Image (cartoon, grey):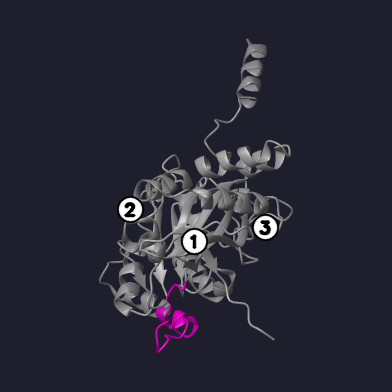
């Protein structure tokens, strides 16, 4: 009987852990914590905004009295990615288990792709329920969270509301099975904590521009996105098969991930949501049934070369615009590889040409010496 008990204990010790959609790894931390007992709060931010993230992290640690672990990639004493590990995997492992993500959003002029990726991972429907809280530190909010209740970091009332929920709501961290404190929502302790946070944030917030940033598109703009495995299909094709393989992959799999209103008018669509390049070209063909789609072959050729990290060859193949007598030629103007999202993005501008109606040739004036 004693031997059977030992064998049973051994079998229980060797029982494999249950696998989830993301294999959650243990993350080394600068702060002592029980991984399974403490809820995790993730601060998503640009590293240029680390001072703001530090202030929020210190507030969370102090007011929670160590009951909440904080993940902040820019801080040496917070839970953070482990040295020598793949950054994207470390972030995914943490985001899969977070209870709350605080997104620090300062100005729309910067690149927010990494922060948006972090929020997207946290909101994956296969992961445990996660709350995204946007700390809006400037005049603008991220478009993807435009309809969400945000925390205006400049507004004392918003700071008070956040502090109240953080300290007194039983739903803020469901894992705790209760509120962080026994304070009353309208008590002096909450008001003092909110005022302390406001004072720490105030000198760190970006200055509000007296004149708003203005911009307008000079040429129609599209962004085409390919997954890295799709890029690999293009790169693996032989010289004879490359043109057809590239066209098939780019047209069928290339996702329109961005564009402006001028490009919408050029193609006659109200938006580019969930459109592939093939579907977008199909819309254009239906509006111009008598026109050849050689411009699409030329665009695929440019993207194919750019995907292989080569400068694209330009062979101008024009397409008629929305207005009669206008002609445009596509040009890949920028290439971006995003390992964190396992994709490449290709910025495409459509330059306008004048066409001689007599012989159907594009006119291009060369200055005389």
User: What label does residue 33 carry, if any?
Assistant: none
Please give the residue where the numbered disc 3 appears in the rendered image: 313
Q: How crowded is mark 2: few (under 14 residues within 10 Å), some or many (20 or more)?
A: few
Answer whether labels 2 and 3 touch (C-beta < 8 Å).
no
Is residue 339 in the magenta section? Answer: no
Q: Residue at x 45, y 86 (%)?
A: 207
- Look at the image and tell me in which quarter the C terminus lies: bottom right
Q: Give whichever of 246, 287 is nearer the camera.
A: 287
Residue at the top extreme of this rendering: 1
Disc nearest the viewer among 2 and 3: 3
Residue 183 relative to residue 77: left or right: left
Q: Which residue is drawn at 57% across and 63% down?
A: 72
Please give the residue where the numbered disc 2 appears in the rendered image: 171
Total numbered badges shown on the rendered structure: 3
Report whether residue 65 is seen: no
Q: Residue at x 61, y 52 (%)?
A: 303
Q: Earlier in the sequence, mark 1 or mark 2?
A: 2
User: What label does residue 360 carry, if any?
Assistant: 1
Q: Which of marks 2 and 3 is nearer the N terminus?
A: 2
Q: Earlier in the sequence, mark 3 or mark 1?
A: 3
What residue span does the magenta drawing correspond to? 198-218
- Look at the image and tell me in which quarter the N terminus lies: top right
């Amino acid at each position: 009987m004693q031997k059977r008990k030992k064998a049973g204990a051994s079998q229980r010790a060797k029982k494999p852990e249950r696998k989830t959609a993301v294999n959650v790894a243990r993350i080394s931390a600068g702060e002592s914590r029980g991984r399974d007992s403490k809820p995790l709060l993730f601060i998503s931010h640009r590293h240029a905004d680390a001072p703001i993230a530090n202030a929020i992290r210190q507030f969370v640690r102090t007011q929670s009295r160590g009951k909440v672990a904080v993940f902040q990639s820019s801080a040496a004493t917070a839970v953070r990615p482990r040295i020598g590990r793949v950054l994207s995997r470390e972030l995914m492992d943490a985001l899969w288990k977070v209870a709350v993500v605080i997104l620090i959003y300062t100005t729309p002029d910067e690149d927010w792709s990494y922060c948006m990726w972090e929020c997207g991972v946290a909101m994956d429907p296969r992961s445990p329920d996660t709350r995204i809280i946007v700390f809006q530190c400037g005049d603008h909010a991220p478009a993807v969270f435009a309809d969400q209740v945000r925390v205006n970091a400049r507004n004392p009332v918003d700071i008070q509301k956040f502090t109240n929920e953080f300290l007194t709501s039983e739903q803020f961290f469901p894992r705790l099975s209760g509120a962080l404190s026994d304070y009353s929502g309208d008590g002096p302790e909450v008001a003092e904590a909110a005022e302390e946070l406001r004072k720490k944030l105030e000198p760190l917030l970006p200055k509000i521009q007296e004149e708003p940033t203005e911009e307008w598109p000079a040429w129609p703009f599209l962004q085409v996105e390919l997954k890295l495995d799709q890029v690999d299909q293009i790169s693996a094709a032989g010289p004879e098969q490359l043109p057809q393989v590239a066209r098939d992959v780019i047209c069928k799999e290339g996702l329109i991930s961005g564009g402006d209103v001028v490009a919408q008018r050029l193609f006659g669509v109200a938006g580019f949501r969930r459109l592939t390049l093939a579907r977008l070209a199909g819309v254009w063909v239906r509006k111009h049934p008598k026109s050849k789609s050689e411009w699409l072959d030329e665009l695929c050729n440019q993207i194919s070369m750019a995907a292989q990290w080569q400068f694209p060859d330009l062979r101008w193949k024009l397409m008629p615009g929305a207005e009669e007598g206008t002609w445009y030629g596509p040009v890949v103007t920028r290439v971006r590889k995003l390992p964190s999202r396992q994709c490449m993005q290709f910025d495409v501008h459509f330059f306008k040409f004048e066409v001689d109606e007599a012989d159907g040739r594009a006119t291009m004036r060369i200055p005389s010496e």
